[in-house]
Every structure is written in C-alpha cells, then in structure tokens.
Image (cartoon, helix red, strand yellow):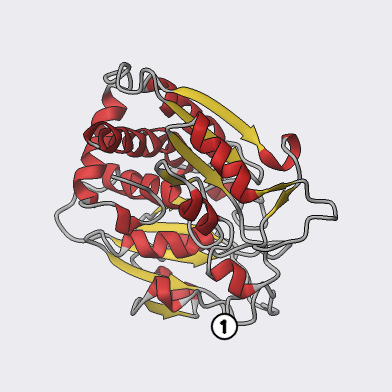
Amino acid sequence: MKKFTAVSDVDNLQEMIKKALRIKENPLSETEKGKGKTIGLVFLNSSLRTRLSSQIAAQNLGLNVLTLNAAQEAWNLEFADGAVMNGDTVEHIKDAIEVLNQYCDIIAVRCFAGMKNKEDDVNESILSQFEQHAKVPVISLESATRHPLQSFADCITITENWTEERKPKVVLTWAPHIKPIAQAVGNSFAEWIQEMDVDFVITNPVGYDLDKNFTGGVQVIHDQDEALKDADFVYVKNWSSFDDYAAMPEVKENWMLTNGKLQATNDAKVMHCLPVRRNVELSDEVMDGENSIIYQQAKNRIFSAQAVFSEILDGIVNN
C-alpha cells in the first residue's frame, strides 16, 4: 500500500478486515516493524479518537510518533499557489510538507472541509497538496470528503457483529444537529459499505442527499420509519446539505433515533462515529442501551489504523 485516502487504496477489503482482527487479538505482534521509522501526525483540526488511536497503533508497531497540532502550534499556513505572503500567513504549505518529508517516513494528516467553498472541498484543496508535495506515503486521518480510517473501523465492527449467513441490512440514517456538519463520514461510510456483502440503504430528509459520487446507485429513502424496517445495523450521523452546500434545510419531522424507532428493526445494532450530541442526534436510551456498539467502533479505530500503518510499512520496505 503506497497511500491511504479512500477505499480504492485497499486491494482486498475482506483481507484487510481479517488482518485488523488478527491485530486485535495480538496488538503487539509486530512491535519491531516500525523500528527506525517515523510517522508524522498532522492535525489541522480537533481530534480525540483519531489522535489517540493513531498514536497507539503507531506505538504498537514500534514507530516513532511526531504529533503536530498545526492549527495551534505551527506557523499560520498559506495554501494558495502563487500567493503574495504579505498578510497573516507565515509559511507556505509546500514548504511545510517539504520539511515533513525530511523528518518523516509517513505523513498522516487531518483536514476538515472548510464548508464555505464547495469546489475547494470537493477537490480536497488541502489533502491534495499533501498528496502532490509529499515524497513519502500519505494517510488521511479525515479530509473534506472522506474519513477512511473511521469507515474501515466501521466495516470491522459490522463483521464482528454479524454471524448469520444472510446479508445484513445496513441503514445509514441522517440525524439532527445544531450546526452544519460536513458530509465526510456519510460519504466515506457509503463508499466503504458498498464493498461489503450487505443490503445498504440511506435515509435522510429531503434536501440532505449526499454526493452521488459516493452513494452511486444506493437507494435513498426520505421516510426514516420506512427505511428502518428490518434493519440489522443502524449507523447514525448528521450531515449538512450537499446540493445547497453547507446549508441546513428545515426538517419538521423528528429524526433523532429512539428505542421506539428501533422497534421496527431486526433488533438492530446502533453505530455512531463519535463525538455525539446526546439527545439531539441520539437519545440517551439508545446511546447507553444494549443495542449500542458505538464504543466497540471507537476501540476498533486502533486496529483499523494499525492494519493500515502495517501495510504502509510493508510498502516502504518493499520499495
């Protein structure tokens, strides 16, 4: 594996899931693999699970870990090509990445959508510069349009919780929020889960359809109660409008998931990437209930990251 920014970078998802589950059984099985190598974790945005799980995963592999909170600890970065830097920005992203090339064997970066310019976000204006200027493998710790390590952990979690021979029904449901949220998690989950042997449905209010470049021909149902019927897994996540970019069209129906709504499912397991706005996106009764596998998802973030880092290290050695 030469980079990791989307499911298309994974040659065989089922084999990667098996690898992650083997790592989960014995996280310290490859402690010498990263010896003498350094991974730089660059955070342009806030993080809890991504930061900690990536650090643990890297340490389990023997990697030296450099963590940079770029938005707080580094010089103000300039991202525009040809910029005349006579304002607040002090260092161009090209120069920062070239320095990272000198210090790191792997660069992992987290850069959220700006939620202001649709074209910039869709074209991954920040992540694309890391891919363009990095001379070492680049890993996305979440970008404007995708959150691949989260989606990989989601696939691992579903695999762990499904033992029947039939295909499970997986529903991605929109949830309310108090502010506009990027589509990255929803996009990414839709992209990854289509590589799994499941029946997949998306449900969201009118005006909140995700980018079809990620959802493809997946059925979108605008009636949540209808979509939840016979579901085996329900993934809860908010996102803002894609068509009316970053807007929050009015929603009159109650879309918060409750135990009452779960009655229509096949005793579905409930998932969420966290952080979650309790009693806005998800009721306490669901969040803390027996159907919740949310914390299992969070733990699996370690093993999704470790499996990817391990594959990247294999690529470095083979080169």
| Residue 268 relative to residue 69: left or right | left
Residue at horizontal 46 percent and vertical 60 percent from the top = 262
Q: Nearer the viewer, residue 314 or 225?
A: 314
Residue at horizontal 63 percent and vertical 33 percent from the top = 68
Q: Residue furthest left?
A: 165
Would you say residue 49 is visible in this rendering?
no
Q: Residue furthest right?
A: 87
Residue at horizontal 62 percent and vertical 74 percent from the top = 118
Give the residue pinned by disc 1.
206
Q: Is residue 70 placed above or below 283 in the rendered structure?
A: above
| Residue 182 relative to residue 159: left or right | right
Q: Nearer the viewer, residue 113 or 183?
A: 113
Return the x and y of residue 240 as percentages of the image width and height.
63, 70
Characterize the local packing of mark 1: few (<14), some (14-19) or many (20 or more) Cα atoms within 10 angstroms.
some
Q: Is residue 20 placed above or below 209 in the rendered structure?
A: above
Return the x and y of residue 169 as percentages of the image width and height.
30, 63
Quadrant position of the C terminus in the picture: top left
Residue at horizontal 53 percent and vertical 49 percent from the top = 286
Would you say residue 198 is visible in this rendering?
yes
Amino acid type at circle 1 is: Val
Return the x and y of residue 136 as percentages of the image width and height.
41, 41
| Residue 56 relative to residue 248: left or right | left
Q: Is residue 260 placed above or below 98 in the rendered structure?
A: below
Looking at the rendered structure, the secondary structure element under dot 1 is loop
